Amino acid sequence: MSAFSFLLNLLWILFGGLWMAAGWVVAAILMAITIIGLPWTRAAFNIAAYTLLPFGQKVVSRAVYSAVRISAPDRSALSAISCGSCSPAGG
């Protein structure tokens, strides 16, 4: 985290970020208690982390994140699977 991000995060926490993150944690705990809210509990905890320290964080799409972790041979198989209506190469 850069010094500028640290300064912005410090100001964010002082001027309301802490209360916002605490609110998301309380919401996550309430969701965890109910069966209906259980699937969204993890998302609420993630949002709490992002609202506590928003500067310097990077939100990445799940598809982009998983494509980066896949090795080169598997990436071609993934693109063939994800493009269901595409015709095979050379055919």
Image (cartoon, rainbow, N blue to C red):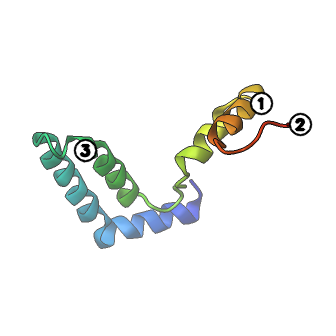
- The quadrant holding residue 85 is top right
Query: Where residue 69 appears, x then y in whole percent?
Result: 64, 33
Tell me, yes or no, whether the two marked residues, 2 and 1, touch with CB atoms within 8 Å. no
| Nearer-the-camera pick, 52 or 63 | 63
Q: CA distance from mark 1 to mark 3?
A: 34 Å
Q: Amino acid at mark 1?
A: Ala
- Reply above or below: 73 against 24: above
| Residue that appears at 28% across and 70% down | 16
Query: Where residue 53 appears, x then y in whole percent?
Result: 41, 57
- Reply above or below: 77 against 24: above
Tell me, yes or no, whether the two marked residues, 1 and 3, touch with CB atoms within 8 Å. no
The mark closer to the camera, 2 or 3, is 2
**Location of mark 3 (residue):** 41
| Nearer-the-camera pick, 3 or 37 | 37
Tell me, yes or no, whether the two marked residues, 2 and 3, touch with CB atoms within 8 Å. no
**Mark 3 neighbour density, 10 Å: few (under 14) some (14–19) many (20 or more):** many
| Nearer-the-camera pick, 37 or 47 | 37
Q: Amino acid at mark 2?
A: Gly
| Nearer-the-camera pick, 24 or 72 | 72
**Location of mark 1 (residue):** 72
Quadrant holding the C terminus? top right
**Location of mark 2 (residue):** 90
Q: Amino acid at mark 3?
A: Thr
Q: CA distance from mark 2 to mark 1?
A: 21 Å
Query: Where residue 12 appears, x then y in whole percent?
Result: 38, 68
